[in-house]
Image (cartoon, rainbow, N blue to C red):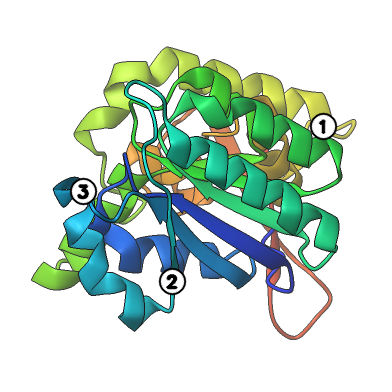
Amino acid sequence: MDNSNDLRLAVLIDADNIPYHNIKGMLEEVAKYGNPTFKRIYGDWTKPTVVGWKGVLLENAITPIQQYSYTSGKNATDSAMIIDAMDILYTGRVDGFCLVSSDSDFTRLATRLREAGMRVIGMGEKKTPSAFRAACDKFIYLEILQIREKKTETGNKPKSAKEKPKGISKADKELIDLLSTSINDIADEDGWAYLGELGNLLLKKQPDFDARNYGFNKLVQLIKNFPNFEIDIRESGKKTGKLVYVRTV
């Protein structure tokens, strides 16, 4: 997949509906895609509901933006975050945005940023409405990061390709159909598709697609779990690195 580590990213966090306890996992995930040039978090810091964030802001160099709730039932925090995002866009100092929220109110913002040529990465809980997930180039579930942190704390090793997690059987048919059609979409005359291109296509079709949703660290591990696919590892012509190709059988 495309992990452009040189991208300058603006990380904007909605404190109203994102838990603070997983901030380390969030920022580590962001680092895979680029360098967080801006790190801002929005909320009404006079409310007790966001008090947990105050203890982690300084150690993670996140700038808090105060936004009072002027009217009951209106989310002023969302408006402040949207306005800031557009201001940052027009500075021309970033290549993409990471919008951390489970709120569908940011759907139009994500769409507008992509129209401007920005790469948009979304992060939120699984309750995030599908419209916001689809508006992003990639959407990452926070639950995945929480599982990873728990494994790190307990010292458990991540699942290998040979282990079959419980969740994989729940959506076998849909997942196999998605993988099969995507492989056939980009396959050569012999039916082989380059794994990197496959990963990019899967994200275009489903921005929230992630092998970790099914209990695997890598896409190749997920594919190996099914007998429906064949894998061919080829020499790349360089001293380091090999090319992985897949096809349906």
Q: Residues within 10 Å of mark 1 (few under 14, many from 20)?
A: some
Residue 164 visible in the shown view: yes
| Mark 1 vs 3, N-terminal side | 3
Lateral position of residue 124 relative to residue 145, left or right: right
Closest to the camera, between mark 1 and mark 2, is 2
x, y percentage for residue 89?
Answer: 78, 54
Mark 2 vs mark 3, CA separation in Å: 18 Å
Q: Which residue is mark 3?
A: 47
Q: Which residue is mark 1?
A: 186
User: Please, what secondary structure does the residue beneath circle 3 have?
Assistant: loop
Displayed quadrant of residue 183 = top right
Mark 1 vs mark 3, CA separation in Å: 51 Å
Q: Amino acid at mark 2?
A: Ile
- Mark sitting on residue 240: none
Q: Amino acid at mark 3?
A: Lys
Mark 1 vs mark 2, CA separation in Å: 41 Å
- Mark sitting on residue 62: 2
| Mark 1 vs 2, N-terminal side | 2
